[in-house]
Image (cartoon, rainbow, N blue to C red):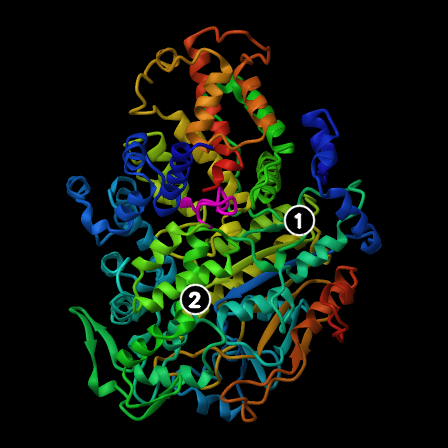
Amino acid sequence: MRITRRNFIRASLGVAGYYLATPHFSALAAAAARLAPRRSGIDKVLVVVQLAGGNDGLNTVVPYTDGAYFQARPTLALKPEMVLPLSGQLALHPNMSGLADLFKQGKLALVLGVGYPNPNRSHFRSIEIWQTAEPNRIANTGWLGRYLDLASPASGADDNMLPAVNLDPILPKTLSASKVVVPSVTNPNLFRFTTDPRYGQDRENQIAAFKQIYSSFDLKRPECDLLRKVGLDSLQASDYLLDVVKKYQGTVKYPDNPFAKGLQFIAQMIAAGVGARVYNISLGGFDTHAAQTRTQANLLKQLSDGLAAFQSDLEGHGVDRDVMVMTFSEFGRRVAENGGRGTDHGTAEPLFLVSSALKSGLYGDYPSLSNLDQGDLKYKIDFRTVYATILDRWLGADSQQVLGGRFDSLPFV
Amino acid sequence: MSGKAAENFWIEQLLRRAGFGCTPQELAGYKALGYEDAVEQLINPQRVPNDELGTLIEQQDFDFTRLDDLKRWWLYRMCFTRRPLEEKMTLFWHGHFATANAKVGQPYLMYMQNLLMRKFALGNFHDLLLGISRDPAMIIWLDNQQNRKGKPNENYAREVMELFTVGIGHYTEQDVKESARAFTGWQTRPDGFYFNANQHDNGEKTFLGHTGDLNGDDIVAILVSQPATAQFLARKMVTFFVADKPDQSMIDDVADAYMASRFQIRPMLKTIFTHRLFRSDKAYHAKIKSPAELVVGTLKTLQVTKLDADLPAVMARMGQNLFEPPNVKGWDGGPAWISTNTMMERFNFATRITQQKFDALEGYFSPSQLAANQGLRRARDLVDYFLALLVDGDVPADTRDSLIKYVSTDFDGQSIEAIPDDRTLDAKLRGLVHLIMTLPTYQLA
């Protein structure tokens, strides 16, 4: 059952005072009323998987018949008999059997050579560009934050308490929004507002005092508004998420690592009908400047096995047609290996999309390994094309409003 | 506010920012010095004996080859040092040079790096940067071990500019490549830093307009002297110590202090703490406490002397894992500390602390004794006492009213004139402190 802000607050406070207490709410509501798109009947979910550090695309989606690949990477090139072919020219890293199976089942689409003009090779600037969809200036909101702001209803009649959920310890800029507050929950078991257990009878009094203080806390210090909003959301989300985890146990066995456990928690929330439109999770460690082979192999296995278990779990609950997963990284890596059996920061990369509802296949052409930009791959598809496709055709939003411009779309959905 | 009251008010802010807060006794000591002398003492830690901390640390018998001991060691230092600014600057540099044990894999090297940063914390930035460039943990962290003649690895060369000195926009990709060549052969061995001449590229290089057979020492010297470095460091320090939207004129003053003193950190800090904008409305309660400030500050204010072994893990769940910064950029700080996850951790830390006995709070073993000692009979006096102690009284009027109402309510939710018994008083006092620690103001420094 989706829990709305209004019925939760009414039940606990006994007043509809929350809306009156947020000073700027009515101004924002008026603005949003002019922009909010019509929502379609079915709510689609996007799960964003950020590969942190800059994943080496060349060893993920491998041009295993191209001589230039083997020449550029005397120690790092993967053996052609080990890789998992997707076509006559391209194959997946040997550890990605889970995703290779999904490709055979028609549930995996790969977009090749994704990047943007004037690529930036700084981790922080480049990830910011991907998260905000603004290569040319520093933006304060993320592309999905802007989507959530536009999609959240103006009058608050159906205001979802959990518009999106972030599973990383820090909220990524992707989900930075003007209006909507996205909760971050890494471990649902730790997510409970505690009070002194010796004085259990006093708990409700404390919680009542907390809510009373927080709903009208007005102090002119720089971050008080943020603290107030997040504090209140924390309390509200608390016991609710624990209940979700208890109720929705699936039958799929997930690998034993934090990334897979995070995906399992996402599957539970989706199956429980929590109503969040976007989930965000990261897998880190891809910045393989040295000794790349083993590190990347382990990470790609985690990614592939985790996503395979996730897809299976969604199918078990009958919600797979409403969910799409998108992976991305701040950049790919240099074509030639460096002196430490690793690779340095590069440019274009492949994106993975997983869903029962997409048109499987390879989209775009693999970037040339000979026609390079100072040793780096030249991108072919602007990442905002992928975003626009997802916004327009999957989430039912207006990509032009979110991205500030018109971009082509791809036919993967 | 009268002169002395105003001075005391700003001294409290000074200790929140230049340190991690204070015990009531320490605060009285700084107030006796007065603001200007308190600043002088803080920026000259070398003048303050720290023997008690040394003894305390020896008693704990930490094993510096274990990461969990290393984290507890640093927490002890933050709590019990008599040189708070030295410890705070070490934390600043740890965030700046953001090296993580997850990759270095050797806690003892992380310990040595920590000692290096403390040694030069308020000294000359040239000495610090040179030391860091030769530091084994750093060499491993940014892959300089693999940076060899003919097969350069650009990681250190890039990050030393992007993150440690001049910042983005003040160098080209070509500078990165040339700098990488200059750092070739800068390696580490079990016995420490080692210059591997065989792997060093001693050809001619051009870096930021300088040409020659440049070595890593030359790169460090060039970078340290750049006005862009002065601005970059000044901006970071003003943000760290004053406010998240730092004032450009203040940054300029601090950058000038760096250049005028030939790259010293101490004059920058003096400029910050004696600047008119530091003792201003714009700076007051303008920063969100980092987990370190929240945890250590709480322990000091409430005089908790026993440090639970899992406090570093609590801090990590709040978003600050010592010796394991999330990436090369360290901790962004400010609003980045605040998410539903981390707020919940802060709230639950408050529960844990208020559940424990308040060790040294005089007369606390009997709550009614405390109330009698302090002359606190009425709910509003209890509330005002703890509001002053914990948040400087900086709350809206209706918050104070809500807290008074909470203290004047019995377990069944009925309002009461007087607290009926010790058990209720104990519950209400602990609940009151818990509620105050969950307030937005308590998250502010």
**Bounds of the magenta segment:** B277-291
Callout 2 crowding tier (Cα within 10 Å): few <14, some 14–19, many ≥20: many
The main secondary structure of the magenta stretch is loop
Q: Which circle marks residue B232 in the picture?
A: 2
Residue B202 screen position, x and y as percent: 26, 90
Left or right: A132 with respect to B177?
Answer: right
- The image shows residue B58, relative to residue A213, as above or below, that is below
Amino acid beneath label 1: Ile
Asked if the stretch drawn in magenta spans residue A9, the answer is no
Residue B363 screen position, x and y as percent: 31, 16
Left or right: B181 with respect to A269?
Answer: left
How many tags in the picture?
A: 2
Observer-nearest of B148 and A42: B148
Chain at numbered mark 1: A
Residue under pointer 1? A270
Residue A249 screen position, x and y as percent: 59, 43
